[in-house]
Image (cartoon, rainbow, N blue to C red):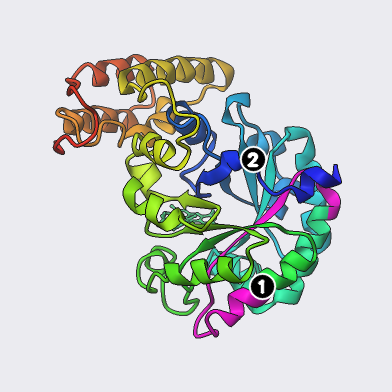
């Protein structure tokens, strides 16, 4: 499978949804897939420990419809990462991504995430071990630096050393991580965005597949930033305004447009059917699914009532899928989904 590993992620991945802990779980990904059929989705970061010692079906299981789908791993031991990759193989992920960008204290105490930027030789060993164990491409998601590390030298060294060992695809969150004194949330907002650094990296390493992430909120901006790069990764904007994913797809993958923009009412019907199956399959409460759908009607008259009704499901363990349909009945569809005022 060497050629598959070396081919990088196919062009289908010009758009991807970022890995987000507690957000991009399997229910969220099922939902996003209904809106954006061709976008590469990422799991939440899963630690090697969770895969080796935890309930693998729970951490790695997913619906077939979620493909193309990348598993993001967190770890700092080459043998453990290789083992996690092997254990994940039967689940059929399309790519395995290494997290070199998360700044949380918990992650730092395990010496993985963003603090790995200080150890590019170790990262190279990690990706080499992962590639050795993997049948699919191994990718890296990183920041541009940590603390006051040199920009862009820190990123350049990490990328060059990882590429030397066979990684072809990099997702760059275009800001530094400040490991002392900022919460993870602040670390996504306070260090300044440096999209220019990502473009400079691609200029220097045109042979690699370079994807830009951080602060991308609308399709026009995405199209501009995508110029000269291989792809765009969207995090919070995809979660908070999920229908926007369809607009991002239209702009970034115009060759294969969806026949028509997704109809949010149709998506509610599909999600209600999914919620029924999940409840029957393993007693999944509606709130575990509905919590990802709060932003579905953003910008449409009735969006507030939708959020309020769905919010009720968060506190009612007996709520059923019927609540989704009831909540959607409050929404009057505008003639055009885009460009309507926010309720
Ligand atoms: C709730 C939340 C959880 C996140 N968890 C992860 C994670 O598990 N792994 C990771 O690499 N990045 C994680 N991130 C960072 C995002 O992947 C992304 O890099 C960041 O939000 C910047 O992109 P955006 O401006 O498009 O949101 C998380 C972000 C958020 C908001």
| Residue 158 numbered mark, or none | 1
Image depth: mark 1 or mark 2 in front: 1
Rendering coords of residue 115 (x, y %)? 60, 73
Q: Position of residue 141 (x, y in %)?
A: 59, 59
**Is residue 154 shown in magenta?**
yes
x%, y% of residue 190?
A: 35, 72
Q: Dot 1: what SS?
A: helix
| Neighbourhood count class around disc 2 (C-alpha, 10 Å): few under 14, some 14–19, many 20 upward | some
In 3D space, how far apart are the residues under numbered discs 1 and 2 (Cα atoms)? 28 Å
Q: Is residue 301 above or below residue 109?
A: above
Of the image marks 1 and 2, the number of the one nearer the N terminus: 2
User: Contact (CB < 8 A) between labels 1 and 2?
Assistant: no
Q: Position of residue 195 (x, y in %)?
A: 43, 67
**What label does residue 59 carry, if any?**
2
Residue stretch in magenta = 132-157
Pick the front one: 198 or 95: 198
On residue 65, which mark appears?
none
51 sits left or right of 248 in the view: right
Q: Nearer the viewer, residue 303 or 221?
A: 221
């Amino acid at each position: 499978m060497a050629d598959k590993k070396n081919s990088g992620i196919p062009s289908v991945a010009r758009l991807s949804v970022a890995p987000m802990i507690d957000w991009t779980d399997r229910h969220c990904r099922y939902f996003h897939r209904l809106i954006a059929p061709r976008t590469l989705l990422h799991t939440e970061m899963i630690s090697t420990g969770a895969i080796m010692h935890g309930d693998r079906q729970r951490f790695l299981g997913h619906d077939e419809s979620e493909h193309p789908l990348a598993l993001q791993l967190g770890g700092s031991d080459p043998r453990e990462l290789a083992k996690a990759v092997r254990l994940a193989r039967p689940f059929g992920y399309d790519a395995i991504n290494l997290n070199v960008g998360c700044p949380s204290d918990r992650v730092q105490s395990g010496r993985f995430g963003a603090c790995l930027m200080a150890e590019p030789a170790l990262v190279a060993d990690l990706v080499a071990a992962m590639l050795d164990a993997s049948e699919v491409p191994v990718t890296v998601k990183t920041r541009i630096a940590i603390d006051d590390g040199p920009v862009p030298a820190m990123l350049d060294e990490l990328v060059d050393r990882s590429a030397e060992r066979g990684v072809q695809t990099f997702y760059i969150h275009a800001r530094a991580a400040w490991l002392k004194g900022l919460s993870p949330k602040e670390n996504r907002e306070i260090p300044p965005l440096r999209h220019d650094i990502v473009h400079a990296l691609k200029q220097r390493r045109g042979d690699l597949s370079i994807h830009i992430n951080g602060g991308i909120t609308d399709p026009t901006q995405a199209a501009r930033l995508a110029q000269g790069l291989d792809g765009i990764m969207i995090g919070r904007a995809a979660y908070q305004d999920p229908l926007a994913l369809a607009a991002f797809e239209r702009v970034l993958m115009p060759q294969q447009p969806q026949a028509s923009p997704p109809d949010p009412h149709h998506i509610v019907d599909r999600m209600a059917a999914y919620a029924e199956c999940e409840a029957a399959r393993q007693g999944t409460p509606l709130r575990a699914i509905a919590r990802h759908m709060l932003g579905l009607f953003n910008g449409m008259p009735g969006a507030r009532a939708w959020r309020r009704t769905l919010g009720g499901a968060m506190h009612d363990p007996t709520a059923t899928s019927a609540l989704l349909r009831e909540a959607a009945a409050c929404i009057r569809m505008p003639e055009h989904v885009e460009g309507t005022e926010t309720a």
